[in-house]
Amino acid sequence: MNHEDHQEETLHVGSGEFRMTKQRRVVYDVLLDQRDHPTAQEVYSRAKRRMPGISLATVYNCLDTMAQAGVVKQVNVARDATRFCPNLRPHAHFLCARCGEVLDVDLKPTADATLAWAMPEGASVEHLEVAMRGLCPTCASQPAQLV
Amino acid sequence: MNHEDHQEETLHVGSGEFRMTKQRRVVYDVLLDQRDHPTAQEVYSRAKRRMPGISLATVYNCLDTMAQAGVVKQVNVARDATRFCPNLRPHAHFLCARCGEVLDVDLKPTADATLAWAMPEGASVEHLEVAMRGLCPTCASQPAQLV
DNA sequence: ATGAGATCAAGAATTATTCTAAATAAGGAA
DNA sequence: TTCCTTATTTAGAATAATTCTTGATCTCAT
Ligand SMILES: [Mn+2]
Ligand SMILES: [Mn+2]
Ligand SMILES: [Zn+2]
Ligand SMILES: [Zn+2]
């Protein structure tokens, strides 16, 4: 008794498959628990609280593995460091110029995001990434910049 | 006679203004002459052919100045180096996964690119950047990967 | 011509990310 | 179990894009 359970589940998700190791579990939970689109560095900070020995390289590896497998999404907003997101619905990202928050913006139920664009005839779109910048509802309702 | 004309025009465009110096002229012409969304490094290579003494730092400075002034646009596609584009119309960018070409995709005349998205109530969008990945018309019509 | 401020140039510094190589852990077969 | 093969983790070096620093040079208006 008291033998540790070293059984790891193998997940088959999206395109790839991967083993859900302890480190990957921690990294994934970090993303699930606070959905604010952290960078790899930020994920590393949070992961260390749960697993002090985890390394930054491993965090990068885990994020990359899960991105490959389609379990998390990489989010590129402007030139900043890549952010990560466990929201698998088709969605865009909104960066608030004032408070820095990154919000998910869902695709409307029946909408087609490419419809507004004059796609070249014969092109096939595999992937679409939309980044918006502006003022989030909270900041937009604020009086003015007191700074 | 034979006195060089050192008069520089001051351009007022978009948000800012700036002097059109020799270096900035060269950098801008590079963008106008080949509209393939080159990176800063690529702009530097091309600029050196016209002005051998120009420095990479200056190319970065020029691109930044003109981007600030709104004369050129910075284009972020995936994690690659920033690309630059003198097309001021509202447009998206399409990266061909096969040949690497970056194409402009115009916004349809009356279309609103945010329409497909369920924007949070009260948010104001100042800026929107759309990056698409897929196969360009040429590559899409190709038989199959012979590699 | 002169002085203030803008611009340029060279190289150092920064930062995110990837790579390398060695140690460790996991899963399967015997 | 024990042994073997392979996947994963780790620390640190390497890379690459970009920014910063500093001094030289240029421009424009006196
Ligand atoms: Mn998201
Ligand atoms: Mn363009
Ligand atoms: Zn905000
Ligand atoms: Zn192509």
Image: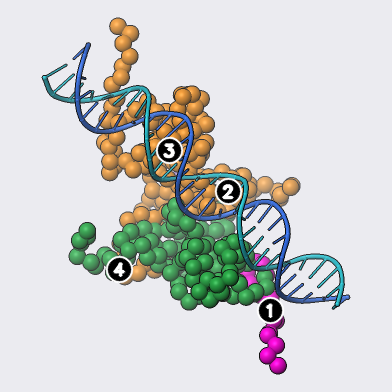
Chain colours: A orange, B green, C cyan, D blue
Report whether B101 appears left or right of A10: right
Give the amino acid type for the residue marked by disc 4 in the picture.
Pro
Q: CA distance from mark 4 to mark 3?
A: 35 Å
Determine whether the residue tagged by mark 3 lies in a helix, strand or loop: helix
Give the amino acid type for the residue marked by disc 2 in the picture.
Cys
Give the amino acid type for the residue marked by disc 1 in the picture.
Glu
| Tag 3 and tag 2, C-beta contact below 8 Å | no
Q: CA distance from mark 3 to mark 2?
A: 26 Å
Mark 3 nearby-residue class (10 Å; few <14, some 14–19, many ≥20): some
Q: CA distance from mark 1 to mark 3?
A: 49 Å
The nearer-to-camera label among 4 and 1 is: 1
Q: Main secondary structure of the magenta part?
A: loop
Whether disc 2's CB lies below 8 Å from ligand 3 is answered yes
| Tag 2 and tag 1, C-beta contact below 8 Å | no
Above-or-below relation of B99 to A64: below
Whether disc 4's CB lies below 8 Å from ligand 4 is answered yes
Give the label on residue B137, or none.
Answer: 4
Residue B108 visible in rendering: no
Give the label on residue A96, or none.
Answer: 2
Q: Quadrant of the N terminus of chain B?
A: bottom right
Residue at mark 1? B8
Report whether B72 appears left or right of A6: right
Q: Name the residue: 30% across, 19% down.
A: A6
Q: Which residues are magenta?
A: B1-17
* Both marks 4 and 1 on one chain: yes
Q: Position of residue B93 (x, y in %)?
A: 43, 63
Q: Position of residue A18 (x, y in %)?
A: 29, 35
| Tag 4 and tag 3, C-beta contact below 8 Å | no
Residue at mark 3? A60
Q: Nearer the viewer, residue A64 or A116?
A: A64
| Tag 4 and tag 1, C-beta contact below 8 Å | no
